[in-house]
Amino acid sequence: MKITQIAVSVFSVPGNTGPFDLVEEEQGARRRWRRRGLGSSEELLHVMHVFTDEGVEGVCTVGDARYLTLRKEDLGALRTLTVGANPFDRERLNSKLHAATRGLFTRTGWYGAFDNCLWDIAGKVANLPVYALLGRARERCPAYFNYRGASLEACVEDALAAVGMGFPALKDHFTGTARENIAWFQAVRQAVGPAIDLLHDAALCTYSWTEALQVGRALQELDYGWFEEPLPDRDQRHLQRLCAALDIPVVAGETLMHDRELSALWLICGATDSLRANARHGTTAVLKLAHLAELHNTRIELNGPGGLFGLIHAHLCCAISNTSYYEYFPGGSRDELGWEIGLLNPPLPVQGYIAPPPGPGWGAVWDWDYFTRVRVAYLT
């Protein structure tokens, strides 16, 4: 079997990252920039098609909720480097494209959608879903619910609603000071009880190292499951100190996860306790990092839907034994958005669990007539 063509379908969809301004505000003795949204926006979404001489086609979105397009130069390079190759040579092609990254002056992980298309082809030829092809660690995976609210009362209400839907774990994105957030952590823990796994994502906070230590100790006392992005990901030295000082797992590196070498380095040098990964950078890269984490007796936690509106991470969460949860965002912008381009089966949690579809490959079911009708361009 040989790769004969790589094409890209282009769509216009509602964006997940709208325009925003940054407003400077006081925070104790410091000042910080707080993001203020300026409404919604439309953005382009690319869907990649890898065709073969035996009629088997691999399909995957470029990106997931972010990084939705491929540069024209990268698409051209991908064709030059891979057309004519055997799509089963995933490891060889992954090595080749990784080596090409430096010469292309492009971002690491740029070929992730292509790699995912190769896994789709492999599953279709084997007549197996990808998670079975990879070894099937489980049939379904628990999901955590990202709860939100403009006030503490609204957050507690949203958290309780998620518990009522069967979610075993909840994650916040609080934006307050260390003192404010600790009060909210206590209120949420009291509301949901001890059986629910609570997670704190500090990506929108600006903790100092001292504040991060204070928050981490409070999270430990409240039996939180992990402390995510407590400090800027590139602040290696202070992340090392924080990981050494806390018992709660620190999950850093989300803004580095496109780079598997940097992700590995952060884990090995103690700047994170667990890895963060997203299959928009390629399933092969995620598997390498998962095995590395396993050998270090730790976990890899998948970020967001990972491509195909959640289908890819639904598979990987059921194929990787050392991952805890599928990350679920309510509201439909990460999964149900697939319906707008003709995907008929975006995965949705049932009683707090996610399961991949049984079909071969990624198991995506498409209304191809609708898909073709609503796309705005086709790059061949």
Image: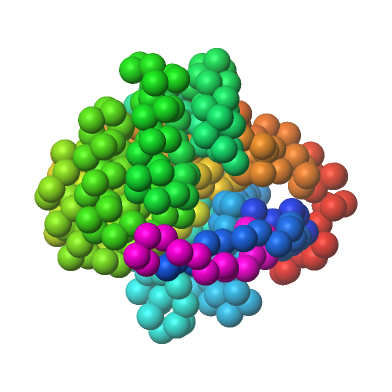
The foreground one among 96 and 375 is: 375
Q: Looking at the picture, how far across and down is residue 363, in whole percent?
A: 59, 34
Q: Looking at the picture, how far across and down is residue 96, in whole percent?
A: 38, 70
Q: How many marks?
A: 0
Specify whether 36 is left or right of 269. right
Q: Quadrant of residue 120?
A: top right
The foreground one among 225 and 127 is: 225
Specify whether 85 is left or right of 206. right
Q: Is residue 363 above or below residue 369?
A: above
Residue 88 in sight from this viewpoint? no
Q: Is residue 42 above or below residue 322?
A: below
Q: Which residues are magenta?
A: 17-30
**Outermost residue, left direction?**
244
Residue at image location 53% in from the left, 43% down from the top: 305
Q: Looking at the picture, how far across and down is residue 184, in whole percent?
A: 42, 35
Residue at image location 46% in from the left, 39% down from the top: 172
* Protein image colouring: rainbow
Residue at image location 28% in from the left, 28% down from the top: 222
Specify whether 357 is left or right of 19. left
The foreground one among 57 and 270 is: 270
**Outermost residue, right direction?**
373
Q: Is residue 154 above or below residue 241?
A: above
Q: Looking at the picture, how far across and down is residue 7, in whole percent?
A: 67, 63
Residue at image location 63% in from the left, 77% down from the top: 72
Main SS, magenta region, reads strand
Asked if residue 282 lies in the magenta stretch, the reply is: no
Quadrant of the image containing the C terminus: bottom right
